[in-house]
Every structure is written in C-alpha cells, then in structure tokens.
Amino acid sequence: MNNLLRSPYLREQRQFPWEDVKSLSNQMDQAYIDIANKVNLRTIGVYAVNNQVITGNKYYIQGSTQAQQSLRQIFVFTSTATITTNIDLTQVYQFNQGYGSYTDGTNWYGLIFGTNGGSINAQISFYIQPVTIAGRPNSQIVFIVNVNAPPLTYGSITLDWLAYF
C-alpha cells in the first residue's frame, strides 16, 4: 500500500517499555508525535458563516511537492438575487467545492454548483462570477433559477477554495 493510502491511519498496536523510564519517555514522545501527525491529516470539521476557515484538506497542485490547504466559508441567503461574497479574487486560485441547500418553507432541496449556460429543469443552480466592488476584486454567487423550481425562502451555500498564500 502506498504512503498516501495509509498516511491518515495510526498504528493499532504499540509496546511501551516498562523497565526503563527513559525508553518509556521516548516511546510516549513518539506516540504523541504520531497521533498529532495523523490527526492533522484529517479534514477539519469547522464551518463558519462570515469567516474563512482552514479545511485541513491538502492539495498538491501541478506536481508540487508542497501541499496547499483549502479554505471554507458558508454564505447564507434569503433570496436568489445575486449575493455578493467577501472573497478577494486576487487570492483565489480555484474553487474546489460548492454545495448548498434551501427551503421553500416546507421541504428542503439541494443547490447545484452548475454552469451559467442555462437552467436545469426544476432546480436552482449557481456559479461564481468575478466582479469589482468599490474598486476591489471580489466575487458574486449568481443563481440560475428554473421556472419549475420550488420557491426559495432561505438557505446556504458552502464554498471550498484554494487561495494563494
């Protein structure tokens, strides 16, 4: 099994020496380092509105040996009008994921990170468009609403992107 497939897993068994305190101390130090390294390889489960958070996901772009982490933020909305986000496009390398849901007041529906090429029957989709707001690069979430889609009362979109650090 290659290193990328086994990297997030901890050893299932470890023998701690009981006769020598120095050896025990060394094993305990190594066990802590192993645990910290493996925990840090996991996705961070923090999702925030109005704040960018590090996802913990690592990406190796264009064969780079240095990992790049992605950022995540939730955007809440109450209509399908264009929503202006607070993401500085000069810092965005690429969007990795975009997903969300909304309600019509009764049922919940998924939102599709789609295309601006046209609507999808009975669905609401969205795309991200670069804009300039007050002379500063920014972006907008643009909704594409099919006429047969359930009406939107409120919902949220979660975006995950790579930034230039």
Image (cartoon, grey):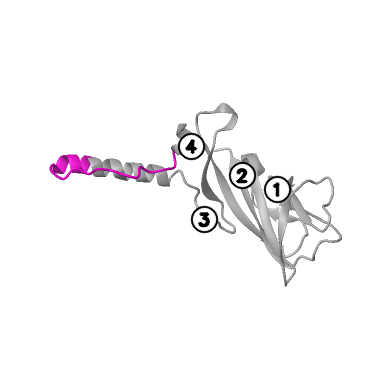
Pointers 4 and 1 in contact (CB under 8 A)? Answer: no
Question: Looking at the picture, does residue 105 appear above or below residue 133?
Answer: below
Q: SS for tag 2?
A: strand
- Which residue is drawn at the image coordinates 66% and 60% (left, top)? 156
- Disc 1: which residue: 139
Dot 1 crowding, Cα within 10 Å, few <14, some 14–19, many 20+: many
User: Viewer-nearest of labels 4 and 3?
Assistant: 4
Q: Quadrant of the C terminus?
A: top right
Residue 89 quadrant: top right
Residue 12 lies in the magenta stretch: yes
Residue at the (58%, 50%) spot, across then down: 72
Say what amino acid the circle numbered 2 marks: Trp
Going by the numbered disc 3, the residue's amino acid type is Val
How many numbered circles does the render carry? 4
Q: Assess whether mark 1 and mark 3 are in contact (beta carbons under 8 angstroms).
A: no
**Residue 49 is drawn in which quadrant?**
bottom right
Q: Residue furthest right?
A: 147
Disc 3: which residue: 46
Q: What residue type is disc 1 on?
A: Ser
Q: Which of disc 4 and disc 2 is earlier in sequence? A: 4
Q: Nearer the viewer, residue 130 or 146?
A: 146
The image's mark for residue 161 is 2
Crowding at mark 4 (Cα within 10 Å: few <14, some 14-19, many 20+)? few
The image position of residue 78, as x and y in percent, is: 72, 65
Give the residues in magenta: 7-26
Picture disc at residue 5: 4
Q: Nearer the viewer, mark 4 or mark 1?
A: 4
Tags 2 and 1 touching, CB below 8 Å? no
Q: Viewed as shown, does residue 69 lie left or right of 139?
A: left
> Which mark lies nearer to you, 3 or 1?
3
User: Where is residue 136 drawn, in percent x and y?
Assistant: 68, 45
